[in-house]
Image (cartoon, grey):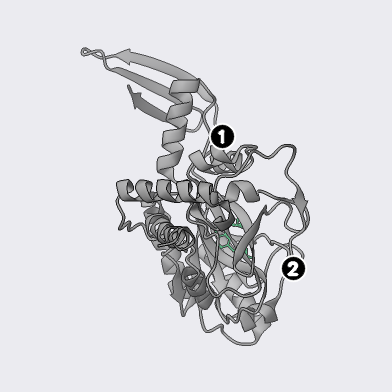
Amino acid sequence: MNPKDRIKELQQELTHAQYLYYVKDAPTMSDFEYDKKYRELVDLETAYPEYIVPSSPTQRVGMKVEGSFEKVVHGRPMLSLSNVFNADEVRAFASRVEKELGHKPSAYVVELKIDGLAVNLHYENGMFVRAVTRGDGRVGGEDVTANVRTIKSIPLYLENAPEFIEVRGEAYMPHSEFKRINEERDEEGGLPTFVNPRNAAAGSLRQQDPAITASRNLAFFAYAIGSEEGASIHSQEELLKSLENFKFSVNPHYRVCQTIDEVIETINYWEEKRHDLPYDTDGMVIKVNSFDDQEALGSTAKDPKWATAYKYPPEEVETILKDITINVGRTGVLTLLVSLNLYSCLVQM
Ligand code: IVH
């Protein structure tokens, strides 16, 4: 096979292997095989740089960027969400929706609210060209393209994509990575540890050196589109399916609910269950499914009227440390009695 065709073949094979590994969580190629092919591709691309394409798996980690991150205006504002805190407020939200529409929406989509950072990805003719943080929602998002490219579950090229599309979703840090990075910072560097996965993700996206971001192994769930030209999608359910077809990682736990009782049941189910997930969630998002209904409902200056976020009570609370009593056991086990002004806890070391 000539070098040009072999390069193309390897680029496609490795892109697919990355997709199976990072998006589907079902790798079919061994690490050994992957590394061998990756090395072959790097060698060939070094010898024939004219065949390097920006979507090649070798092009994820770029050069260090100097200076501050450029501010970018969003094609369509990145809105925030109104909040509800209990079942009554969910019903009140649904009543408002029905009243304004003049009919019951045929369905709601309930999704996990991922606790990360909203990022807007721009694709031109299928090519990933830019990634911008939400910032204040309208102007003031930051261009974090070089860092977001390193997130391996984000496709660098979309097959059969419209001419232009903005894909929105949440960049987040899985628990396993958060733990690994904090242990490493603590043990090796004596560096301050990150408070929570969201802060760690935010810090990782604001690095000057994409190699550092790459080493943090962030992940991404897609859940919305911004402006687009040429896509024809009619509902949130269809949208999630087309994002999956574009090979984005879409959170699998969304549910299409026909009634508000089902919505509430789903929220209750996840209140406890969410602690078993390998990433942080801080609530659920309830969305009117039909895009026609969404358009009819419109938005306020801040939030869409067709969606709301159900917030679970926070796990992190601020408190005051009152006292620590240390008890040394017979076998040398230390037990600390930590008294806080809200409650006490026992810590065994
Ligand atoms: S939809 C206009 N869906 O929550 C619709 N947002 O408080 C806007 N978020 O800025 C967003 N998971 O960062 C949506 N499944 C999900 C989400 C989600 C997390 C975040 C997002 C947004 C914030 C709003």
In this view of the protein, which residue sits in the foreground, 164 or 12? 12
Q: Is mark 1 within 8 Å of ligand 1?
A: no
| Residue under the image location 48 percent in, 52 percent down | 152
**Residue assigned mark 1:** 318
Question: What's the amino acid at mark 2?
Answer: Thr
Q: Which disc, if any, is residue 300?
A: 2
Q: Position of residue 224 (x, y in %)?
A: 59, 67
Residue at the farthest front position: 2
Q: Which mark is residue 105?
A: none
Tell me: residue 181, above or below residue 323. Answer: below
Ligand 1's quadrant = bottom right
Quadrant of the image occupied by residue 347: top left
- Tell me the element at label 2: loop
Q: Toward which corner of the image does residue 99 lie, by quadrant?
A: bottom right
Q: What is the C-alpha distance between the residues marked 1 and 2?
A: 32 Å
Circle 1: is it few (<14), some (14-19), or many (20+) Cα within 10 Å?
few
| Rendered residue at 45%/22% (across/down) | 188
Residue 85 seen by the camera: no
Mark 2 nearby-residue class (10 Å; few <14, some 14–19, many ≥20): few
